[in-house]
Image: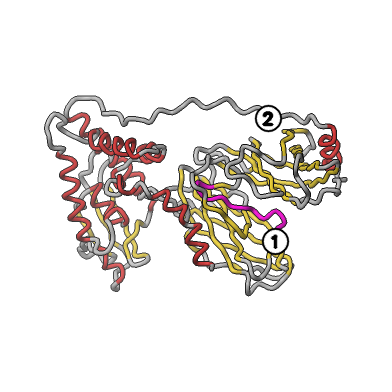
């Protein structure tokens, strides 16, 4: 069951790489800006146009039928791929270096002896390192003589200093454009950008107009929440792939919600009002509709620490719940979203906008507002990682450890492992699951800790649940 659920959850990852049929062979040449531009494209026509313009920017003689740069690159790619044995060149550090910088002027092993390019040495008693020296790189790529050090890891040779080498390789990508443009004395051919509709004005947030809703919010905010309508609630914070921060709120109830209304009042740490709204419990425009007794919405809440009063008024009765939550300052900083706990998710027929609560592309996660599970359940955990540093291949290198703690017992942590998920812009959505069969009943805490291996930055989030 766990494997099936993970396969379904990780289906979201395939969305990110469906583009490979267009750019799989040119990823190594794409600058960071080109990668960002490509991620914005939606249609096949736009993606094909991107590839055509990509090669045009690198064509040293655009008036002739042949693109000499493309021909030379494809020949080099084939030769380097042959050396990489079972890997593609752009998947290895050595392959990337050969394709972008060419063969080194000199190459030595740890003992100072001459070495070669073979990738499989790293898994057959390899020396401690390879050192490649480049003496004649273009000035706009590197000034003077540089050395690149590789160390064996995981059966292959990896950069000893990814950040420094990554910067050099990015300059080599830029050089491949500037050289060709200057060679024929013309301006760089701009990539055709998809037409972007102007951002709509921020939707007006409805005010609280129903006296019963205001009374329920007042009581909940002061710590005397009404209890006639049973309810559970969540308050979480997330960031879009472009860096926009927003908060989500979820409510579940067993009461009849026909004609019911929801009130939300967000207050800062001093108790001052930040945002307040009233909404119908049942959103008639939701597609697909929420399950009976279930409500979700979002609000644009800036970074800070808050409390929120959530109230439901139905059939002349009311209920309330007060929560505290934080919205981290995600702007350009490595971080992690709220952690979603669930036992269920749904696959949608079409992807939803990023700010749709608890929805990631075509995957709709139903967060468990009560946080009570049984031993028969698989605990689904979903979180997002923000602003991780990309490696030379343009991918984040993030490691995750998940700790489980029952009561006051010593936490039990999983082994550090790569965080694998859907990468879109500045974020990575990571799903995982754990069968609860062997977990003792009781109250549990979860701590998700992440580390950016390229910058050594860390971040963590905690939440709790109960096993009956």
Query: Label 1 crowding class (10 Å Cα cut-off): few <14, some 14-19, many 20+?
Result: some
Q: Is residue 360 left or right of residue 32?
A: right
Query: Label 2 crowding class (10 Å Cα cut-off): few <14, some 14-19, many 20+?
Result: few
- Is 368 magenta? The answer is yes
Q: Residue 465: which disc? A: 1
- Is 192 magenta? The answer is no
Give residue 137's position: percent from left, percent from top: 23, 43
For the residue pair 135 and 300, the one nearer the viewer reads as 300
For the residue pair 221 and 125, the one nearer the viewer reads as 221
Q: Is residue 93 placed above or below 326 in the rendered structure?
A: below
* Res. 354 in view: yes
Q: Tag 2's secondary structure?
A: loop
Of callouts 2 and 1, the N-terminal one: 2
For the residue pair 242 and 178, the one nearer the viewer reads as 242
Give residue 201's position: percent from left, percent from top: 58, 25
Q: Is residue 150 left or right of residue 64?
A: right
Q: How many marks?
A: 2
Name the residue rendered at 18%, 25% in the picture.
185
Q: Which residue is mark 2?
A: 205
Which range of residues does the magenta coloring cover? Answer: 360-372
Q: Tag 1's secondary structure?
A: strand
Labels 2 & 1 near each other (Cβ < 8 A): no
């Amino acid at each position: 069951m766990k494997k099936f659920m993970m396969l379904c959850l990780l289906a979201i990852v395939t969305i990110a790489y469906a583009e490979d049929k267009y750019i799989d062979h040119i990823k190594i040449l794409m600058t960071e800006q080109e990668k960002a531009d490509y991620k914005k494209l939606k249609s096949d026509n736009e993606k094909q146009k991107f590839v055509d313009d990509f090669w045009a920017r690198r064509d040293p003689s655009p008036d002739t039928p042949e693109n000499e740069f493309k021909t030379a690159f494809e020949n080099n790619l084939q030769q380097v791929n042959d050396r990489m044995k079972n890997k593609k060149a752009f998947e290895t550090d050595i392959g990337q270096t050969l394709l972008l910088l060419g063969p080194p002027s000199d190459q030595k092993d740890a003992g100072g002896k001459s070495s070669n390019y073979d990738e499989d040495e790293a898994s057959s008693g390899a020396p401690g390192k390879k050192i490649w020296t480049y003496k004649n790189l273009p000035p706009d790529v590197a000034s003077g003589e540089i050395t690149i050090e590789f160390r064996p890891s995981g059966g292959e040779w990896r950069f000893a200093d990814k950040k420094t080498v990554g910067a050099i390789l990015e300059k080599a990508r830029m050089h491949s454009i500037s050289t060709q443009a200057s060679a024929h004395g013309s301006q760089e051919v701009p990539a055709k950008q998809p037409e972007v509709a102007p951002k709509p004005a921020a939707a007006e947030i409805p005010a609280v107009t129903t006296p019963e809703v205001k009374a329920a919010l007042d009581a909940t905010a002061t710590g005397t929440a009404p209890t006639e309508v049973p309810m559970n609630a969540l308050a979480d914070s997330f960031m879009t792939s472009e860096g926009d921060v927003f908060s989500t709120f979820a409510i579940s109830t067993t009461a009849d919600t026909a004609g019911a209304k929801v009130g939300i009042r967000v207050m800062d740490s001093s108790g001052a009002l930040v945002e307040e709204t009233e909404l119908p419990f049942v959103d008639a425009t939701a597609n697909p509709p929420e399950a009976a007794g279930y409500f979700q919405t979002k609000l644009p809440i800036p970074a800070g620490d808050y409390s929120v009063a959530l109230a439901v008024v139905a059939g002349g009765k009311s209920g309330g719940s007060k929560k505290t939550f934080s919205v981290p300052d995600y702007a350009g900083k490595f971080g992690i979203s709220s952690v979603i706990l669930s036992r269920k998710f749904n696959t949608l027929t079409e992807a939803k906008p990023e700010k749709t609560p608890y929805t990631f592309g075509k995957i709709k996660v139903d967060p468990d507002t009560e946080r009570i599970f049984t031993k028969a359940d698989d605990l689904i955990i979903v979180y997002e990682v923000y602003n991780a540093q990309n490696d030379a291949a343009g991918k984040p290198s993030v490691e995750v450890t998940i700790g489980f703690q029952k009561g006051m017992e010593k936490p039990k942590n999983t082994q550090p492992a790569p965080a694998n998920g859907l990468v879109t812009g500045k974020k990575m959505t990571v799903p995982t699951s754990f069968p609860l069969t062997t977990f003792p009943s009781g109250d549990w805490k979860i701590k998700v800790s992440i580390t950016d291996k390229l910058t050594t930055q860390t971040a963590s989030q905690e939440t709790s649940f109960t096993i009956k």
